[in-house]
Amino acid sequence: MFADKVKQLAALPTPCYVYDTALLAQTLEAIQAETAGHPNYHVHYAVKANVNPIVLKQIAAAGFGADCVSGGEIRECLEAGFTPESIVFAGVGKADWEIKLALETGIAMFNVESVEELEVINEMATALNIRARVSFRINPNVNAHTHAHITTGKAENKFGIDKEDTIHVIRLAQSMPNIEFTGLHFHIGSQLLVMDDFVALCQNINAIQRELDEAGIYAPNINVGGGLGIDYQYPEAHPIPDFHAYFTTFAEGLKLREGQQVHFELGRAVVGQMGSLITKVLYVKHGHVKQFAIVDAGFTDLIRPALYGAFHSIDNVSAEAEARATSATYDVVGPICESSDVFVKDYEMPETRRGDILAIRSAGAYGEIMASGYNCRRLPKAYILSEL
Ligand code: LLP
């Protein structure tokens, strides 16, 4: 779809995002095909990756649940058609109004990250005379192989409750009249491509479950979080992540108790490959040491390269560029007044000229949603590829 439509991109006001909802549909189908044999598997889309209303509606209509981390995300999800019973709510710092909204909405469960938060939820549920469904986010102390800023499951990270305290917090919850203990939640990091990290998570969960057995505690729900990565190097070759390997890892690795439901919170793997940031080349500057392709998108539009050193492959999609025989090496940079405003360094591309249109690929997750207005820049708009 993307390749068929590139000609239309030249007409769009840049910088902007385009979303390939046909690829999104195929991705959702691929997840459904892999989970069809497991009626106890529930996939909640991690809404933080992209809240474009068309994208959200499509995911809701396909029957997925949602993983939210704020009251704002809960509202967007309800608007898009997710049912309250399909929404899980995580986050280390839930504000009182967000807890109240979640309680009144009747979401599936809170993923609680501290005893302090549990106490506040109990107080607020008591005041509303309802029972809050609560799972505990346990920090399994697994070292995931990814960027330090997106690893979350180590003891030094701010997330979750130390695994040594698991039984203590469950007992505490069970003693609170307005709390219903619903299970355990984990999330070890993002952009994970090594299945061994998920194997390690399963082993940790199995060990915790053995301790729960000994304590006579049953956890009805096990939420393994998200984290499955995508191929940023070759988005054309791998538009859909390896969901077979992912779900098989959990099917083989998790030792479940009778009736346990397993929840997944996939974000990037669902929407990452369907999005591109479209930008126009403003100038090609020939320095003594480097050539710069200066584009009209900056880190205000896509912060991942500046923040995590992330790589995004870039295509020159201008019709004219195809006819040019030579290629050259460029630093592709934005207009923001900071040295970190670089999309890629020393990147070989077909010869690039002023006015060319570039597609920065694999930008469907954590792209538009992390945009800012720094330098008084406008937020990028988004378009649906099939509607161009
Ligand atoms: N569940 C929890 C509790 C999370 O914290 C996250 C992501 C997810 C699920 C979804 O993870 P995913 O399947 O997308 O890997 N902005 C960064 C990624 C931050 C991820 C934060 N948490 C980036 O651009 O790489």
Image: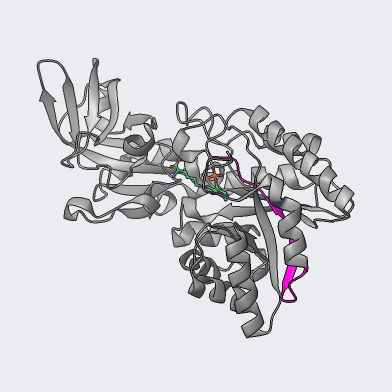
Tell whether position 204 is magenta. no
Q: Position of residue 255 (x, y in %)?
A: 83, 41
| Residue at x-position 84% and y-position 43% | 210
Q: Please, is residue 218 above or below residue 320 in the view? A: below
Vertical arrangement, residue 293 with respect to residue 184, above or below = above
In the image, residue 179 lies in the stretch drawn in magenta:
yes
Q: Is residue 291 among what the camera can see?
A: yes
Which residue: 65% across, 42% down? 30
Instruction: Identify the colour scheme used.
Output: one colour
Is 239 in front, or is 190? 190
Q: Nearer the viewer, residue 218 or 374?
A: 218
Residue 238 on image: x %, y % = 54, 30
Left or right of residue 240: residue 292: left
Looking at the picture, how far across and down is residue 39, in whole percent? 80, 52
What span is colored magenta in the figure?
A: 175-189
Q: Position of residue 131 (x, y in %)?
A: 71, 76
